Image: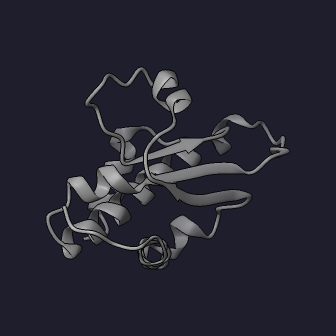
Amino acid sequence: MFEISDEDFQKLIDEALGELPKNQTDGIKNVAILFNEEPTEEQREKLNLHAGESLFGLYEGTPLAFRQGNPSLYPDRITIFKNPMLAASPNMEILKARIKHTLWHEIGHYYGLNHDRIHEIEANWK
C-alpha cells in the first residue's frame, strides 16, 4: 500500500467531482463530501459489516427521490474511506479511478438510484 497525504487525498476527491458529468453533479444540494480513514463502528454496525469487510464510500441521508419535497434540515453526507481505498489500489491511476467510481456511486444513492441504474449511467459515460 502506498501513502498519500490527507491534503492530496482531498484533492483527488475534488478532482473526481470535477470530472463527473455536469448533469449528474448540478443537482447536488446540501451534501457534505468528505473523507475518513475508516468507517466508524456505528457505520459498520449500521451496515452489518463483518470483520475484514471493507467499505470505499457511504452515503448517509434521505435520497432526493424519497423527500417528497421536504428539504433536509442537515446536510446529507458522502464519506470516502481513505485506508480501504489505498489498500485496494496498487497505484495512483487505479486510486483516482476508484475514487471517481465510488464518488459517483454515492451520488447515485443521493439521487435515489439503485445499483443497476448507477452502473448503467456510468457505463454510458465511456
Q: Is residue 10 left or right of residue 56?
A: right
Give left or right: position of 7 versus 94. right
Relative to 49, residue 122 above or below: below
Quadrant position of the N terminus in the picture: bottom left
Q: Nearer the viewer, residue 126 or 76?
A: 76
Residue at x 33% of width, y 40% of height: 116
Colour scheme of the picture: one colour
When asked about the image quadrant of residue 68, the answer is top right
What residue sits 43% from the left and 58% below the top?
104
Q: Position of residue 97 (x, y in %)?
A: 27, 68
Q: Position of residue 93 (x, y in %)?
A: 20, 75
Q: Residue at x 66, y 58 (%)?
A: 32
**Is 82 drawn above or below residue 25 in the view shown?**
above
Work out which quarter of the rendered image holds the C terminus and state it: bottom left
> For residue 86, what is the image quadrant?
bottom left
From the top left corner, tell me how far across and down residue 111 is, in percent: 57, 48
Instruction: Judge whether 84 appears above or below 21 on screen.
Output: above
> Is there any visible trace of residue 111 in the rendered image?
no
80, 114: nearer the viewer: 80
Q: Position of residue 36 (x, y in %)?
A: 50, 53
**Which of 38 and 112 lies nearest the eye of the viewer?**
38
| Vertical arrangement, residue 35 with respect to residue 55, above or below | below
Q: Is residue 93 visible?
A: yes
- Residue at coordinates 51% horizontally, 36% vertically from top-left? 40
